[in-house]
Amino acid sequence: MTARRGSGPTMLDVGKLAQVSAMTVSRVLKNDPGVSDSTRERVYAAVDQLGYRRNQTARSLRLGGSGMIGLVVTNLANPFYSRLALGVQEVATQYGLRMLLSNSGEQADREPELIDGLVDHQVEGLIVVPAGSRQQHLARAMRHVPVVFAARPPAGLDTDCVLVEDFHGAREATACLLAEGHTRVAFLGNPPALYTGAERLRGFWAAHEEIGIAPDHALIRQGLVDSATAEQAALDLLGQAEPPTALFCTNNRISQGAIRALYKAGTTLPLAGFDDFDLSDVLGLPLTLVSYDADEIGRQAARLLIDRLEHHDTAPPASRRISVPTRVVRHGTPSGQQPGRPPADA
């Protein structure tokens, strides 16, 4: 086996000769203790035979490639997307790849320009958190580079995605409130057109149905886009003649807006929500938060993308969907109150 003309041998070349993946080659070269001795010997033999030098060619998994991958997120000010980006960068760095980061600001009409710009910069592939359900521009991009979706699924496109267990997490957190006797739980959610908003409302609704009650439509607020809109919605709910006795929020910004509303209203209600956040454990409020590893979403998305890059000369693998698990974290539970038991898995 010889290296491709015009370039030095790559991790992919070493992997093919050693009959392992490029990811395994990277693990061997980083002295990962989880790699078997026999595999390690095959990789080092291939490195010697090909004259592979990591600092020479590991930046590119494809002949003529730029050694860069693109990441498009919807709101870099949200810590969730910052953590996701760190996860992508962690895996990209392992393969000698650089990451170009773009922020759509939840503006679906801006996203096509960002995608085209990254493709024009000859990125090897793209990881995208789509801002909307219209994704024709991503279908066009897929003619040139592989695209992996993160946090939100593709709409009618055949490609990989990494999601959070949105439905399960929302159902479990809501069930905790219901188990404590709350039957008037308000729902504060992001726009219903977003996958996360729809799935978390579905989980909220399912938890009610499982105990034989229906949510009060008068307590449901959707379309909240930041902490300010969430604060105002929560204040409106708290000012009703029959206010809610607990709140469910679909993301960290909405939770923070609701907490500010509780403070201004001079009251304390149990609050459940998606995304743990800094200082949640020291606020002294009864919080039930859906936690998950946002970095892992980025890591998994990057691994899927790199796997597609490794198979660019062969038939592409079938599209894959990975779900990152959630868990409920409870803070400030009133003394003597026992958290409700979560429901069985879906």
Image: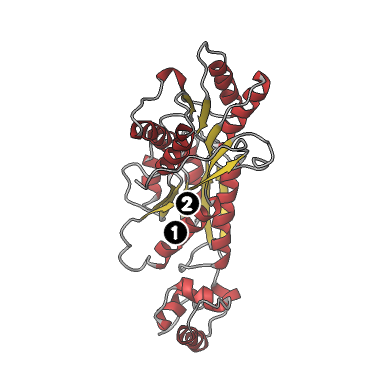
Q: Secondary structure at mark 1?
A: helix
Q: Earlier in the sequence, mark 1 or mark 2?
A: 2
Residue 235 in which image quadrant: top right
Give the number of callouts: 2
Q: Residue at x 46, y 45 (%)?
A: 151
Numbered tag placed on residue 207 in the rendering:
none
Q: Is residue 7 visible?
A: no
Mark 1–mark 2 Cα distance, whole angstroms, equals 8 Å
Q: Residue at x 53, y 13 (%)?
A: 240
Residue 175 in which image quadrant: top left
In the rendering, at what x and y percent does residue 313 appear?
A: 35, 68
Name the foreground residue: 298 vs 132: 298
Task: Name the residue tied to disc 1.
Answer: 305
At label 1, the amino acid type is: Leu
Label 2 CA crowd tier, 10 Å (few <14, some 14–19, many 20+) = many
Vertically, is 3 above or below 149? Answer: below
In the rendering, at what x and y percent does residue 180 appear?
A: 49, 33
Name the foreground residue: 165 vs 47: 165
Vertically, is 211 above or below 161? Answer: above
Q: Residue at x 40, y 49 (%)?
A: 141
Q: Quadrant of the N terminus?
A: bottom left
At label 2, the amino acid type is: Ile
Q: Are marks 1 and 2 in contact (CB under 8 Å)?
A: yes
Task: Name the residue tied to disc 2.
Answer: 127
In the rendering, at what x and y percent does residue 208 appear?
A: 38, 31
Q: Secondary structure at mark 2?
A: strand
In the rendering, at what x and y percent does residue 227 appear?
A: 60, 29
Q: From the viewer's perspective, is 261 left or right of 159?
A: right
Label 1 CA crowd tier, 10 Å (few <14, some 14–19, many 20+) = many
